[in-house]
Image (spheres, grey):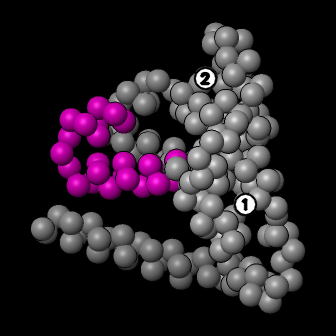
Amino acid sequence: DVQIACLLKNCLITSITALIITTPFYLPLALELISGKASYTALPLWYVSKHSTDILGFFTPSIFHPYLGSMFSKVYEGFTSNVAEATVFVGYACLALAGYAIFSLRNIKVTFWAIISLIFSMLSLGPYLHIGGKPYLALPYLLLYPIVPFHIPARLTVISMLCLSVLVGYG
């Protein structure tokens, strides 16, 4: 399909350009990681699990919400992460518009953004699925834990939110 080929070509060009631009910044970090001197990347699994997103956080308004915050403060007390890392709610309107775009538009671009959003949302859940602060199931992040030096999974929701914003535009 021509549309898929064009999308993949654009993604490849963008990725290569980003790699060229960011290499001077990431090269020292990569050398430090390879040398084994980066002790800050050796965080224990319990720490990584503690700073993972709780799945309820995607559907629970922040405790700072002017109207709904007090209603959901008890839910946030159960989360293992701090308030800054636990606040991943984008809003019901955003979720509805993104859902509308995903389920009503049969477009390769919408599918692309939906898949990327789901991947990063799943990775932000960390090594174990937390529901109300309790870990339940092992997740794919557990396989990446020894490889990836990114040990606060909740911060991966930023990429998921960026993808959702594109989906909202389609919705």
Numbered tag placed on residue 61 in the rendering: 2
Amino acid type at mark 1: His
Q: Is residue 51 left or right of residue 6?
A: right
* Magenta-highlighted residues: 98-121
Q: Which residue is mark 1?
A: 151
* Rendering coords of residue 108 (x, y %): 23, 55
- In the rendered image, the vertical position of residue 57 relative to residue 136, given as above or below: above
Q: Residue at x 77, y 46 (%)?
A: 50
Q: Residue at x 29, y 48 (%)?
A: 110
- In the rendered image, the vertical position of residue 130 relative to residue 72, given as above or below: below
Numbered tag placed on residue 136 in the rendering: none
Within the magenta stretch, is there residue 150? no
Q: Is residue 25 left or right of residue 117?
A: right
Q: Which quadrant of the figure has residue 31?
A: bottom right
Within the magenta stretch, is there residue 116? yes
Q: Earlier in the sequence, mark 2 or mark 1?
A: 2
Q: In which quadrant of the rendered image does the C terminus lie?
A: top left
**Mark 2 nearby-residue class (10 Å; few <14, some 14–19, many ≥20):** many
Taking depth in this image into account, of 113 and 17 the one nearest to the observer is: 113
**Mark 1 nearby-residue class (10 Å; few <14, some 14–19, many ≥20):** many
Taking depth in this image into account, of 162 and 46 the one nearest to the observer is: 46
Q: In which quadrant of the rendered image does the N terminus lie?
A: bottom left
**In the structure shown, which secondary structural element does the residue marked by tag 1 occupy?**
loop
Total count of labels: 2
- In the rendered image, the vertical position of residue 70 relative to residue 104, given as above or below: above
Q: Residue at x 69, y 22 (%)?
A: 75
